[in-house]
Amino acid sequence: MPVVTALPVAGSGVNEAVTADPALATLLEAPRRRRRASGFVRSRGAVAGLAVLLVVAVLAVFADVLAPHPPVAQFREHFLTPPVWQAGGMWRFPLGTDDLGRDMLSRLIHGARLSLLTGLVVVTLSLAIGTALGLLAASAAGAVDAAVMRLMDIVLAFPSLLLAIVIVAILGPGLLNAMLAVAVVTLPNYTRVVRAAALGELRRDYVAATRGAGAGPVRLALRTVLPNCLAPLIVQASLGFSGAILEAASLGFLGLGAQPPTPEWGTMLAGALQYYQRAWWVLAFPGLAILATVLSFNLVGDGLRDALDPRLQR
C-alpha cells in the first residue's frame, strides 16, 4: 500500500493528500517553483532590493578586506575632512572623516556587518520562539491558546520602541541586550502569523488523515502542519529583518544599543547630530545606509509575498 503524506499545493491554496512518490513530487513541484521565481523576477523593486542586499552582504562578510582603514583608527590631522568630491576632500578618505578623524567609509562598511548580524540574531530568536508558541497555541487550543495570545496582546499593547527602551534600561545598554529587546517586541508578529496559518491547516482533511494514521501531536505539528505554514513565515522574516535593523539603530541613536566606538549606524548618527550644519556627511551617510538597507528588505519581502501567495499569482 502506498504511503500517504501531505504536500502543499501552492497554486490553488488547498492542501491535499497525494501519493509520496519522489518522481511525482518532483514533477509537481517544478512548475510551482518556476511560477514563484517568475513572480519574484517580475517585480523590479524586489530584484533591485535583492541586488542592494547582496552588495551589503558582501561588504559585511569582507569588511576587514574592503575597508581602507580600521573602523576605530583616528587620524587626528584630518578632523571632519569632507568627501572627495567636495573642496578639501582627499582620495584617502572617499566619504570624509568624522569628528574624531575616523574614516567614514570604513565605519559604514563595518557597520553593515553589525546591522546584518543584528537582523539575523533578532529574526532567528523571534522566529524560533514565535513558531513554537504559535504551534502550541493552535494545537492545544482552549486555555493554552488564550494564555499565549493574551500574553502577545500585552506585548502589542505597548509601542515597540518604548517597550524595547524599557527592556534595555532593565538589562543595561549594549548591542546584545538591544538584540534581545528587539526580539521580544517583534515576537508577537511571528506568533500570530504561525497560529493563524496553523489553525487554517488543522482544518484540512490531510491533517485528519495523518492524525488518524497515528501521528502524535508533536509530529503532527512539526512534520505535517509547519511545512505548510512556511510561506507567510518567510515573508514575515524578510520584513522582520528591516524592522530589527531599524529598531536596533533607534536604540543605538538613543545611546542604549551599541556603545562607542563600535561602528554601528545608529550610534554613528547619535555622535554626528551636533555637526549636521558644518559637516553634513557624518549624518547623511549613516542615515542613507539605514534607509537603503531597510527599504531593500521591504522590497524583497513584498516580492516574496507576490511570489508565494497563490491568490496574487492568479
Image (cartoon, rainbow, N blue to C red):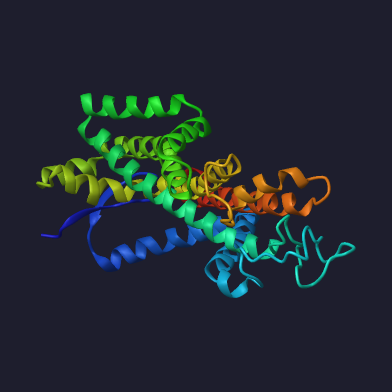
Instruction: Please tell me which residue lies in front, 29 or 195.
Output: 195
Number of numbered labels in the structure image:
0
In the rendering, at what x and y percent does residue 37 appear?
51, 60
In the rendering, at what x and y percent does residue 127 appear?
37, 46
At horizontal 39% and vertical 25% (from top left) the residue drawn is: 154
**Quadrant of the frame with the N terminus:** bottom left
- Is any atom of residue 41 visible in this view? no
Seen in the image, is 236 located left or right of residue 203? right
Q: Quadrant of residue 102?
A: bottom right
At horizontal 31% and vertical 51% (from top left) the residue drawn is: 227
Seen in the image, is 194 located left or right of residue 41? left
Instruction: Please tell me which residue lies in front, 223 or 243.
Output: 243
Q: Residue furthest front?
A: 76
Q: Residue furthest right?
A: 87
Seen in the image, is 15 located left or right of residue 165? left
- Is any atom of residue 169 visible in this view? yes
At horizontal 56% and vertical 72% (from top left) the residue drawn is: 64
In the rendering, at what x and y percent does residue 33 appear?
44, 61
At horizontal 71% and vertical 54% (from top left) the residue drawn is: 285
In the rendering, at what x and y percent does residue 313 appear?
51, 49
Q: Quadrant of residue 129?
A: top left
* Residue 174 sits above or below residue 188 on the image: below
